[in-house]
Amino acid sequence: MTDDTDAILTRLPSRLKEARRAQGLSLDAVAKLSGVSRSMVSQIERGESSPTIATLWNLTRALQVDFAGLLDGDAATARIEVLRSADVPTIENRGSGCRIRILSPPEEAGHHEVYELRFSEGGMLDSQPHTRGAREHLTVIEGTLDVTSAEATQSIGAGDTARYAADVPHRISATSAARAFLVVQDA
């Protein structure tokens, strides 16, 4: 084995354990999510067993961590990830007259999501309830938007932020062309 291989094998157990704890998951939860037995997960975290590539892949998917980043040295902390404007994922088919750019990383889906919204006049984003306790924070950059959460409606303009329940039917509609940032927590 090379020194690089030894270093990777030395870091792997603690990195997997850190990722599991950062997600607030028990060994049992990781076992259920990954299909890897609880005892094997425990052995890997203690450095008593080296996982196969397939096992490691299943664990990284369950823990929502980057496979390569888990094996890298300290380069991840000294690196800046840049997603160029043209490469930002965009959703065009939700609502009408509304373009959604996904600004948060994929591993944050369902936890802490960030979007840029662009509305044409009369555009609308109509959403079904998210998971229980979900909230949205909408900040208008340009234009005016009407926000409806359950039965409550508020009009907000440039510089205003609306915070509201997203575990009920909710809607954002544009009374004029508008641009906004939306943060969705615990979707």
Image (tube, rainbow, N blue to C red):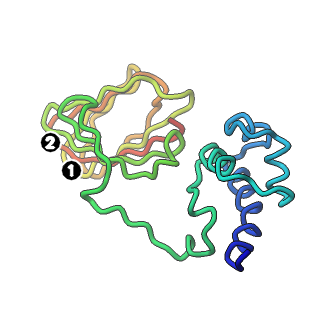
Residue at the spot 29% in from the left edge and 39% down from the top edge: 91
Quadrant of the image containing the N terminus? bottom right
Instruction: Give the residue type that dot 2 points to.
Output: Ala
Residue at the spot 72% in from the left edge and 58% down from the top edge: 18
Categorize mark 2 by other alpha carbons within 10 Å: few (<14), some (14-19), many (20+): some
Residue 172 x/y as whole percent: 29, 32
Gap between marks 1 and 2, in whole Å?
A: 8 Å
Instruction: Give the residue type that dot 1 points to.
Output: Glu
Q: Earlier in the sequence, mark 1 or mark 2?
A: 1
SS of the residue at dot 1? Answer: strand
Categorize mark 1 by other alpha carbons within 10 Å: few (<14), some (14-19), many (20+): some
Q: Quadrant of residue 126?
A: top left
Q: Nearer the viewer, residue 185 or 102?
A: 102
Q: Quadrant of residue 136?
A: top left
Q: Do residues under tags 1 and 2 come within 8 Å of each other at their CB atoms?
A: yes
The residue at the far bottom in this view is 3
Residue at the spot 50% in from the left edge and 41% down from the top edge: 185
In the rendering, which numbered label is found on residue 159? Answer: none
Q: Nearer the viewer, residue 185 or 4?
A: 4
SS of the residue at dot 2? Answer: loop
The residue at the far front in this view is 1
The residue where tag 2 is placed is 177
